[in-house]
Image (cartoon, coloured by chain):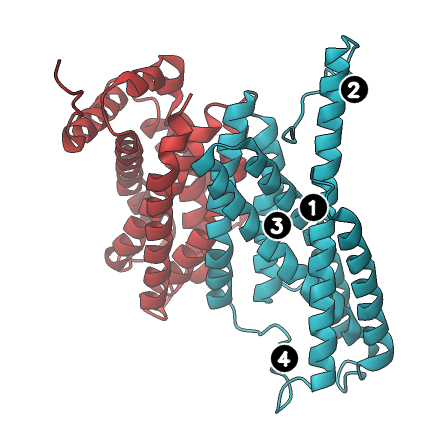
Chain colours: A cyan, B red
Amino acid sequence: MYGKGLKPLSIATVVAIAAAFSLVFFYAPLDADQGFIQKIFYLHVPLAIVALIGFVIGGVFAIFHLRSNDRRWDAWSYVSIHMSVIFGVAVLITGSIWAKASWGHWWIWDEPTLVSFLIVFLMYATYYPFRYAIEDPGQQARYASVFAIVAGAFVPLNFMAVRLAQGLEHPRVFASANGGLPDSMLFTFLVCLAAVALLWLTLVKLELTAKSTSGQLKRLRRALDAPPSGSGRPRIAPEVS
Amino acid sequence: MTAPRLTPSRQAFATILAKDLRSELRTLQSLPAMALFAVTTFVIFRFGLDRTQLSGSLAAGVLWATLLFAALLGVNRLFVAEREEGGFDAIRLAPIDRSVLFAAKATALLAYLAVLELVVVPIFALFFLGSAAALGPLVAVLLLADLGIAATGTLISSMAVHSRARDLLGPLVLLPLIVPLMIAATGASEPLLAAGGPGYHRFGTWLAVLSLYDLIFLLLGYAVFDFLLED
């Protein structure tokens, strides 16, 4: 049932990503200060925005789970956070490349957005050992939801605290130069943002579909009294019905 | 048959808090260890940094890192008795609002931290600071930071205690969660501990950040704590 709509969504994602990359390379003008390397911005910033929103969405799903006690929301919450953590790795890598190119260092501690993102990423990296350590499935789902809610509230708070602590500003590409971003760049950026958001959504749905299919398979096997495959291994991920 | 009656929350709160403080006073499981740990850590910093006098950001960093890690010891032990002696079952059976447990435990942790700092911060001043002039305004920072540690610590500890490897999980999850609090606490303390006497650069801003952090996590803890006690 999670597979419903997955095919059109995937096609839309492929089209959007193809369009986004063509715009990035053939339409958007070269940045006057930074040159070609600035184009990583079209990947880095949307990834970061989508990852952060994905974390907060994971918290919202967790609220639904606690309110309704419906385990499917826990699966949504888990997969949202899981995808955002993966996107987060990409954000840190692309960010480091950009930092190396424009500031000459792989990592800059004075850079609030970089540091905030790292802290948020570390916070969510503990989501996995946290889930793993709680054995009872119902309790695991409940505690993971509480974690997701607390961490979701932590995201904006952390950004505020780190920003206050430091001086040097992130390259605000929108606000740089007088007059801000040229329309062609803004348009390209928005298409990229939409493409990355679609990618996130597709991957989340795909993951949920895979989980629900393997859950169904397991139940069928059990019904046939066959030994389940890959058993004996404790599972972190919630099972989806 | 009369309708089931809840014990008034204030009474339940006072009872649980008194139970906790009494058992800590009788067994002395957490506090002496926390204080001893903090003082030893100061000694380690003295040699690790090879400094006999600290000021500014270095002083703030040593003070807050030490207090945080000492606090973790208390956080880890906060719910151990409930878990091992069946206290959670008793709370579930008792006709009380469950959020009271959160309030009482956070208050107990706040009390531990206050006592810890009452002992350890003067020792820190004695070891590393030239004068005690900063200690007055530092109390405000300590109080607000303690409130935040108490809120997040109670919340995380109550979950970690139900897991395998609970001693590991509590600090693991709590440390990143406390980073914003540490940023604000060290930001406020740094000018206070500056070499030329206490300064108040952005003192108000940092206290506001600390208060916001406290408010958010106290409310969150209060809101979600019910779900942690379900069985």
Marks 1 and 4, the one that precedes in the sequence: 4
Label 2 and label 4: CA atoms lie apart by 50 Å
The correct choice, above or below, for B153 with respect to B186 in the image is above
Marks 4 and 3, the one that precedes in the sequence: 3
Q: Which residue is mark 3?
A: A121
Q: What residue lies at 35% left-to-right and 57% top-to-bottom?
A: B212
Q: Which residue is mark 4?
A: A174
Q: Looking at numbered disc 3 in the image, what kind of residue is underneath it? A: Phe
Q: Identify the secondary structure beneath mark 1.
A: helix
Q: Looking at numbered disc 1 in the image, what kind of residue is underneath it? A: Val
Q: Residues within 10 Å of mark 2 (few under 14, many from 20)?
A: few
User: Residue B92: x, y in percent?
Assistant: 32, 20
The correct choice, above or below, for B198 with respect to A77 in the image is below
2 and 1 marks in contact (CB < 8 Å): no
User: Residue B214: x, y in percent?
Assistant: 34, 50
Which of the two residues, B39 or B29, is positioned nearer the viewer here?
B29
Q: Residues within 10 Å of mark 3 (few under 14, many from 20)?
A: many
Residue A237 as seen in the image, left or right of residue B75: right
Query: Is label 2 or label 3 in front?
Result: 2
Q: Is residue B45 visible?
A: no
Q: What residue lies at 77% left-to-right and 83% top-to-bottom?
A: A31
Marks 3 and 1, the one that precedes in the sequence: 3
Label 1 and label 4: CA atoms lie apart by 29 Å
Marks 2 and 4, the one that precedes in the sequence: 4
